[in-house]
Amino acid sequence: MVAAVIASRNGQAIQNMRARISLDGKPPEPEVQERYRAFSSVLTVLQKGQIDEAVTQYLDEIEQQNWWIRNPDLSPSKSPAALRVPADMIRGLLAIARHHPMHRARAMDMAKRTGDYLVEASDQAGVPYAPFPYWRGKSGRLGELSEKAAQMLQQCGALDNAIRKDWFVVEAVPEEYLFDTGRVGEALSELYQVTGDARYRAWLDDAATWVSGQPLSANFNYNAFSVAFLAQLYLATGERIHLDHAVEKMQFGVLSGMIDVGSSAGHWIDAHNERLVYRLIMVRSLGELLLTLEQDLVAKIDAAKVQSLHASFEQSFKAVESQMLKKKGISQIGPMLEVYHQIRTSATIDFDVSSVLKSQIMSAANKQIITGNGGVSAETGLYLSDS
């Protein structure tokens, strides 16, 4: 029912759907109980020397995790992570390269070698998007997906054709590839913008055609990955069609699931997407779209539509902010850090972030970095580039 309504692009039908699904305008309980890190009474601050040290450590950790460079013969099914992980490393590396000149050569070398690996993965699988490693028997959601799909394909004798050089291509569930394709697309768009490498552009053109041709998913956060990719691709190429597709997917594929009136404004109508991790994915993609619209290079998007997108961003962020202030704790520190980075760097996002939450986000990030638990996420690279 949800898929049919959002596919109709009918505003009134979408409003009616939201009213039916969200009882009395209230969001459902998230399918998994949220975990919060209690606000700290002592705030942690990064000093200049610690920033330099943290950047070096960040690059060292990425180098250690570069399994595709350190172990080029490792089969995809033995790889420790899906393609979304090296894609995020590229975004962090490019942030370091932009803002820390003494580390630029090293960061760019790793970013380009990672980009080459991502393109090669699609080439090996023979698909225009980011494939999955064949992870049958592994734990976690992707392992479960591999097992379930493998059993289905095995029953109908189609499993062998779905395994391509140890990559898993299940044509019956194309929407499952939207997550990784969006992340890889974002990363390669940024990398193409810096390098102008024709191989990255070829992958991007094929992936954009595939993504834009996919129907909207009833899982709202899946559409958000396509929005962020297409918005970033517009910045890299100046081709207006990508921006138009990004705006449409945001309007009908993401915001169609957000409650936009009453005390629950900024929440989502289903228990899955009401989880903070998915809400922040959607908030972040909306922020990426707004940052792109600030640099609208070709033609102006309708002002009323832009104003509506700004209102949705504020509503969705404020709902998260209110939840964390009420709990006196932070959840999903990395995504929160990136959304706050968007607010800080935007020229048009115009609302205040609670000073309490702001200081707690920064302190939590600093503590993770100082203790060596910052990880190699894009958010950590962005934060270190801002510090």
Image (spheres, rainbow, N blue to C red):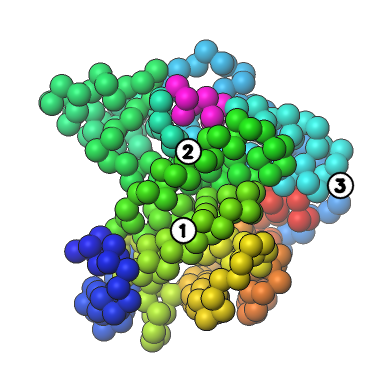
Secondary structure found at label 1: helix
Query: Mark 3 highlights which residue?
Result: 49
Main secondary structure type of the part rendered in magenta: helix
Q: Earlier in the sequence, mark 1 or mark 3?
A: 3
Which one is earlier in the sequence, the residue at label 3 or at label 2?
3
187 or 344, nearer to the observer: 187
Give, as a single range, the part of the protein colored magenta.
117-124
Q: Is residue 24 visible?
A: yes
Q: Callout 3: helix, strand or loop?
A: helix
**In the figure, 239 relative to 244: above or below?**
above
Residue 220: which quarter of the image? bottom left
Residue 234: x %, y % from top left: 59, 54
Q: Is residue 71 shown in magenta?
A: no
Residue under circle 2?
Answer: 206
Left or right position of 303 against 386: left
Residue, disc 1 = 245
Determine the residue positioned at 80% across, 32% down.
105
Give the CA distance from mark 2 to mark 1: 15 Å
